[in-house]
Image: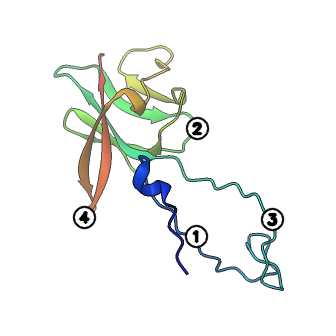
Amino acid sequence: MLYVDGRLRREQVHGVIEIFNHFPAASDFSLLDVQGGMKEKIFTIRFANRAAIWKYTTGVGSKVTAVKDSQHNYNFAQQSNSFISDKPIPFTEAPIKSIFPETGNVGPPVLNVSNANAARIKTIEKDGDLFYCSEIPLNY
């Protein structure tokens, strides 16, 4: 069965969602009860945050020796004048304050490195797969 709302043609629609119920009726995540009826009339659908590989770029002669995460959720590999995350990092409203550049200078790390939501988005190939990549310049 397919239902198409006539508003799709009249209004600007960003996408169409197709929902499947693959869970048995006993599951808390099932949409249907054991009689095949809807368990609830109002549902909340949550989507994973958008994410991108983060690529911090430094200038020639930069004092940045590494990019670290104090929460140990992300690792960054150095490639020339760049530090690239090992996995995509979700976009957030606020900066992720646990990621910081490490420099050869003695002292505490500089926190509040810019978040990816203000950076340039490109694509990058990593291990044979194509990912979105957010380029973030470091001015150190």
Dots 1 and 4: beta carbons under 8 Å? no
Q: CA distance from mark 2 to mark 3?
A: 38 Å
Q: What is the number of the mark on residue 128?
A: 4
Q: Does residue 61 appear to the left or right of 103 in the view shown? A: left
Q: Earlier in the sequence, mark 4 or mark 3?
A: 3
Query: In the rendered image of this protein, does residue 87 appear above or below residue 114?
Result: below
Q: Amino acid at mark 3?
A: Glu
Q: Earlier in the sequence, mark 2 or mark 3?
A: 3
Report the mark closest to the observer, 2 or 3.
Answer: 3
For the C terminus, the quadrant is top left
Q: In the rendered image, which residue does mark 2 sit on?
A: 71
Dots 4 and 2: beta carbons under 8 Å? no
Q: In the rendered image, which residue does mark 3 sit on?
A: 40
Dots 4 and 3: beta carbons under 8 Å? no
Q: Residue furthest left?
A: 60
Question: Within the image, what quadrant is residue 127 found in?
Answer: bottom left
